[in-house]
Amino acid sequence: MGSNIKEIATLAGVSRSTASRVISGKGYASPEVRERVMAVVEKLQYKPSAVARAMVNQRTHNIGVIVFREQQPIVSHPLYGKLIDSILAASEACGYSVFLKTDQEMSLRSTDYLLEQRVDGLILISRFRKNVIDHVKKFGVPYLMVNGTTDDPDVIQLVSDDEEGGASAAAHLHRLGHRRFLVIAGPQEHRSHNLRLEGFLRGLGGFGPSVDCEVVLSSDSTFDQGRRLMSRHAEEFLRAGRTALFATNDMLALGAMRTLLGLSVRVPEQVAVMGFDDIGPAAMYTPALSTVRVDTDRIGKDAVAMLDRIIRGEKDLPKLNVYASELIVRQST
Amino acid sequence: MGSNIKEIATLAGVSRSTASRVISGKGYASPEVRERVMAVVEKLQYKPSAVARAMVNQRTHNIGVIVFREQQPIVSHPLYGKLIDSILAASEACGYSVFLKTDQEMSLRSTDYLLEQRVDGLILISRFRKNVIDHVKKFGVPYLMVNGTTDDPDVIQLVSDDEEGGASAAAHLHRLGHRRFLVIAGPQEHRSHNLRLEGFLRGLGGFGPSVDCEVVLSSDSTFDQGRRLMSRHAEEFLRAGRTALFATNDMLALGAMRTLLGLSVRVPEQVAVMGFDDIGPAAMYTPALSTVRVDTDRIGKDAVAMLDRIIRGEKDLPKLNVYASELIVRQST
DNA sequence: GATAGATGTGAGATCGTTCCCATGTGAGAT
DNA sequence: ATCTCACATGGGAACGATCTCACATCTATC
């Protein structure tokens, strides 16, 4: 393990410079010397220290990914998991290693950590408070935000088209004949929940006065919360003759559907249910959940590609990058 | 951003050594000097370079986590996601940053990458082939395996008690009166699937000749596979009067249950279904899936703690660490 | 046969820290 | 007045690579 380039050089009977040239493959080296050095490298299983390399190159080839979320399941949250999967794959392809950090308190700790590590760049996932963003900004480290919530026009952001997605959910349900709706809407300070609700209402608004929609606000966006809220509103919901339920994410939708099924309400015959995100469990559920898919795969991939471009010094990248969402019709509607 | 300790020293009118002493907090420094240096540090938002620090200390305070899995959802697989969540939290607490890599091909690439990065230690998740383990071994880097498959007695492993868990599932179903079973068993070369099956069969074996069990082997352990296999065997299954289904993980179980529900089989009234792992969706399903919980939380936490101990030079840690699994009874049985 | 250019190699500085050791104080003991 | 020993501080090497520059060959050209 402890072999360094000096050792290689000595054993091959050349100088450090020459050994370095052979190993990195740039600069002159006679075939003979090349072979001799490589033989030693092979024998000692020598690997150049990335730390030393980073030191001189001022480039670590690492990127940091920070996921902020209040509730515990962070990586194991299906949506973030998908995003991280995609980011990891893309990073691998670009030659980056990924530091992953999750943050429940949004102290400056996790960012500071990575700033010390001198990562080449940072991907911030989910909403971050202004002070954190400003903190990162100050360091001049390349960074961008995915699925975030900030109106800071300097920040490069990748988001899904939540407004349009909400509207298409409304259109879909209306097309199926539904006229009386209930919406369970997650935290409105969160950009995506807010836009999804707005999009949905805007969509319904276009269908004239015959439609009717009640909105229930939810303080968080978990399965349990969806379940609880539906329990609380089910009776009134059914009595009011509402036949369609839209939730601003799949977790809430699944939770609500769970309650309905528990009350022996038939989905989709009696009530249609729709979510948003297209997380794994949505397709697995019985009945499978209709939803609006966020293209996490492309977003993750592009996030890495764009970060790489910033790192390489490219300027003037588009600030706000909106990714089309896709209506996924399954059994629940 | 680009401030270094030399700059701090100059601005504070002291030497690098003194500045270093103040910043690291070890060694003499008069209060006056201390204050002067800290003021400059504060003003320039100086952060010591972890890279340089790692260089001299020969310690990065980074650990690498590699997850091997053939199929795409890796991080977003609920079980691995939970494990990673727990590892991240524990690492944070121990002062480690985490490099996360996923590997679908199990080339030596991902390990080599991290070995170059000179991580202080490595956590290998899921089964790794012998050549990869041997490769890591050669480098003398501290490492351990979680949920792995190797009979190499040198390797420190953390696993759940799959055999016992399988047996307790059998006992639970038998206790409910079931006598004719079907098992859908995931890849038998995978330690946990193998032991879960064995444990289940051993458990049933203890109940005498009245019980009858058919085993269907599955080449992978996905939801879709569970669904497909159940489709293929449902008719025969029902005709044979079997009333209980056990799958060696929740994904297979949920897939199979999905098929049954699609055929209007009532769960648990007609057929009881059990899985293993207790992934998130198990509790969310309708009906909620009875299962055997793997204590990913403790395993992840302990993995980091043990790795830390190896890194600190502790010797003679227990090689095989088995964590009790817990029967979780829900609606599906 | 002198010069230019290609080819191959090595010495030394550099990246940003830490840490050992040397040096410089002033106070108190002899 | 000298010696010690706290207390403070600075100089320089080290970590392991890379990269620039200088130097040494060798070959081709006029």
Image (cartoon, coloured by chain):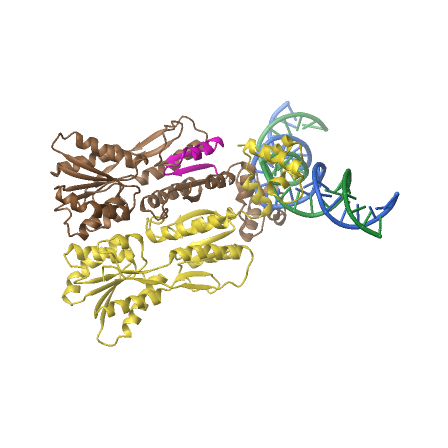
Chain colours: A yellow, B brown, C blue, D green
- Whether the magenta-drawn stretch holds residue B137 is answered as yes
- Left or right, D6 with respect to B211, comes to right
Compared with B190, B5 (above or below) is below
Residue A299, image x, y percentages = 41, 57
Please give the name of the residue rendered at 64% of the width and 32% of the height, measured from the top-left corner: A12
Q: Is residue A304 above or below residue B150?
A: below
Vertical side of B99 occupied by A310: above or below: below
In this view, the residue in front, D29 or A6, is: D29
Determine the image quadrant of residue A45. top right
The location of residue B210, given as percent across then percent down, is 11, 32
**Residue A189 appears anywhere in the view:** no
Left or right placement of residue B21 versus residue B291 in this view: right
Left/right of residue B301 with respect to residue A260 in the rendered view = right
Q: Is residue B275 visible?
A: yes
Q: Magenta stretch: give its range.
A: B119-145
- In the rendered image, residue A164 lying in the magenta stretch gets the answer no
Q: Position of residue A328 (x, y in %)?
A: 30, 61
Q: Quadrant of residue A247?
A: bottom left
Q: Quadrant of the C terminus of chain B?
A: top left
In front: A279, or B41?
A279
